[in-house]
Structures are given as C-alpha cells and as structure tokens.
C-alpha cells in the first residue's frame, strides 16, 4: 500500500519522529513522508510513533492510498527530500 504521513510534533521530538519514519518511508519535505509500505511495517511504524509522541500535544496523520494508479504528483518550487535520501 502507498501512504503519505504528515506530522506536527513538539520541536523536542521532531528529530526522533523523522528518524523513525525514515526507516520505513521516503522523506519528501518538512514533516511529510511517503512511500510503499507493508501492513506489518505500517503496524510497526504506528507502534514506534505511539511510543514517541505526546498524544496531548502532537499529531500524526497517515493517508492510506491503497494504490497510486489514479494519483499524480506535482512539485512547485524547490524539490526537497526524495528517494535518494533513503538511509
């Protein structure tokens, strides 16, 4: 499945959340990641993020697109992140 993950977390946790997400997804730009992920890895990612975030203060949104067949992606301006940035 293909997901887009966006997050808004306290500055104290930004680097940990980004590092965790980059284990599974491609960094696109500040606070946005995307990529193909299996159900098992998505479950692992959710569990790791639940341990990192403060649910009273932070927000993580996961958009599940199931397929990219009917989607397009357009970048206006500076291209940030990308697949070449995978650790």
Image (cartoon, rainbow, N blue to C red):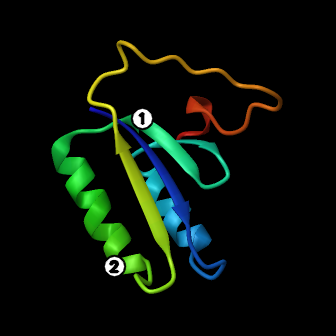
Say what secondary structure mark 1 lies in: strand
From the image, tell me which residue sits under label 2: 51
Q: What's the residue at 60%, 55% (across, down)?
A: 31
Please give left or right for residue 29 compared with residue 36 in the image.
right
From the image, tell me which residue sits under label 1: 35
Give how far across and how far down residue 51 sits, in percent: 34, 79
Q: Is residue 78 visible?
A: yes
Give how far across and how far down residue 49 sits, in percent: 37, 69
Q: What's the residue at 40%, 82% (across, down)?
A: 55
| Other residues around mark 2 within 10 Å, as few (<14) / some (14–19) / many (≥20) | few
For the view shown, which residue lies furthest in the right direction? Answer: 77
How many marks the image carries: the answer is: 2
Residue sitting nearer the eye, 51 or 83? 51
Please give left or right for residue 2 compared with residue 84 in the image.
left
Say what secondary structure mark 2 lies in: helix
> What is the quadrant of residue 79 in the picture?
top right
| Other residues around mark 1 within 10 Å, as few (<14) / some (14–19) / many (≥20) | some
Work out whether 75 lies above or below 87: above
Give how far across and how far down residue 50 sits, in percent: 33, 74
Give how far across and how far down residue 1 sits, in percent: 26, 32
Q: CA distance from mark 2 to mark 1?
A: 22 Å
Q: What's the residue at 16%, 48% (across, down)?
A: 40
Please give left or right for residue 16 compared with residue 82 in the image.
left
């Amino acid at each position: 499945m293909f997901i887009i993950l966006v997050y808004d977390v306290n500055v104290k946790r930004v680097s940990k959340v980004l590092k965790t997400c980059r284990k599974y997804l491609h960094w696109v730009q500040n606070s946005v990641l995307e990529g193909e992920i299996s159900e098992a890895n998505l479950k692992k990612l959710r569990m790791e993020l639940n341990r990192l975030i403060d649910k009273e203060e932070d927000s993580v949104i996961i958009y599940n697109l199931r397929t990219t067949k009917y989607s397009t992606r357009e970048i206006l301006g500076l291209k940030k992140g990308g697949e070449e940035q995978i650790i």
